[in-house]
Amino acid sequence: MAKQKYQVYRYRWVSLLAYTLVFFIGGPLWIGFAPISSTLRQAFFLTGVSDMAITLLVIGPMAVEIVASFPVGILVDRKGWKFATGLGAVIMTAVAIIRLISPDITWLLIFQLFLGIAFALMYVSLAKLAVTWFPRREGAFAQGLGLIASNGGNMAGLVLTPLLIAFFGAYNPSASLQNTMILYAIATTIITIIFFLIARAAPPVPPEPLEETKQVPLKEGLSRIAGARDFWLLGIAFAIGFGAYLSIADYIERMAWSNVGLLQKFTELYVALHHPEWFFVFVDMEQSFGGLASGLVLLSGIIGTIVITRISDKLGRRKLFLFLAVLICTPALFLMGMTSGETLLIAGALFGFFLISVQPLVFESVIEIKAIGPMITGLALGIILTLGHIGSVIWPLIFGILQTGSGSYLFAELFYYWTILPNYWGNVLAFPLYFYFFTAPPLIQLPGTFFGPTLFLVLSAALAVILVALLKEVK
């Protein structure tokens, strides 16, 4: 029998590129609504939009991933990464096109939910792609590049979407929102075509010897995962980290708006009552600043991913970097929730550099747990992503409940319904064309709204520090 050969192919980078293009475009499709909450409320003003409805646009797909990640993990182990990623690309393209006909926020949410299936396919496929095409010494770096694409897409969605809204005309929320979504639909279609043209499922021979080469029965795989202590420590910590990140991503615009100085707040109140037609200036400014903070989180995360994964691969250590990340992110979360201006931007940069950059280390640590290995990578990642997406739904929901239950938020809502709305409709009655020429009623966010939610995130992060400290370093 001929001795089996192993080879590392240059085409591994082309296959990774094909994957990253699809993962990248998923970002704007999913998170692009987070930094334009004011525009959404104004675009769908006649049918009604609540803060929770906007939150569900972001966490809804994550809720679907909770259900989808486990079966997707089995599918990836059976069919391979290219099949799963291609299916995800097709689903994203369909969503990008069909959501253009959304008559109200409810239908937009229904269409968005299908992105959860696509994202589950993408996340689980990444580890399988790395195992299939890359040697272990490049595993964390390869997964890091894949996640950089995802985070880069998120950054593009958070920064570019408010800019596109402004470019197409923030004074006309419905038209600017529709034009932005059309642009994203075209980009998604082009990228999906490119993926099917250049992606390859596997190299002719594997990059290195594998400890296991046969499929592992589902029952045996589940048994091995159930008994892996470090897997569950990582899973719970991952759920907390993912939940904290989604909370920040979803509420960053409103947090930035809430924490500005009192002088600006008094100016906002005056303009809202006496010159509401100019209030879109504040909307533009606050959405752009929230997008800047979000973009900085992701940009620093991209830099951190490149730096930390390379160092981790070189040293062969994972726990040290995981521990440092959650330790530093704990005070950064407090600063992000309670400050504005330069302090908020610095805290966001630290948060992104350390939290986002260790996600590929979590995935690689799962693969390196002895009980798991490459043959049940999809199953293990499916389970850990299920845990992560449970966190990504529960944490923002708790965050939102604490936010809407705060005294500052309740006072702002009462002021909106008792003062701003009557004043707005008074202008409409006095000048019937007012509604068509100017924007919807202005929204107000008061300081102090996010103290309770921020405290919740900080205490959660402290728990993650303890969990990571209990991990054993993989040798």
Image (spheres, rainbow, N blue to C red):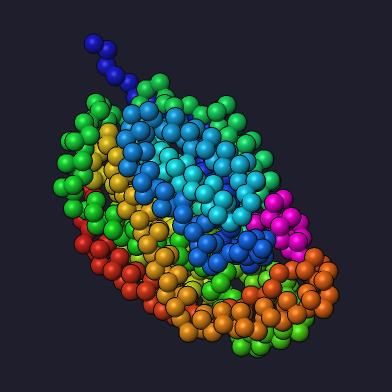
* Quadrant location, the N terminus: top left
Give the residue drawn at x 38%, y 43%: 68
Note whether 454 is above or below 190 in the view shown: below
Choose between 322 and 209: the one closer to the eye.
322
Q: Is residue 96 left or right of residue 408?
A: right
Q: Is residue 323 above or below residue 205?
A: below
Residue 235: x and y, percent?
Answer: 29, 54
Does 165 appear in magenta?
yes
Residue 239 found in image quarter: bottom left
Q: Horizontal placement of 111 versus 210: left or right?
A: right
Q: Position of residue 416 (x, y in %)?
A: 62, 79
Tell me the residue at 36%/46% (across/down).
67
Magenta span of residues: 160-179
Q: Is residue 14 magenta?
A: no
Residue at 42 percent of width and 44 percent of height:
120
Magenta segment, prevailing SS (helix, strand or loop): helix
Q: Nearer the viewer, residue 45 or 269?
A: 45
Q: In the visual, does 288 lie left or right of 126?
A: right
Residue 105: % across, % down: 58, 56
Q: Residue at x 28, y 55 (%)?
A: 234
| For residue 58, above or below residue 227 | below
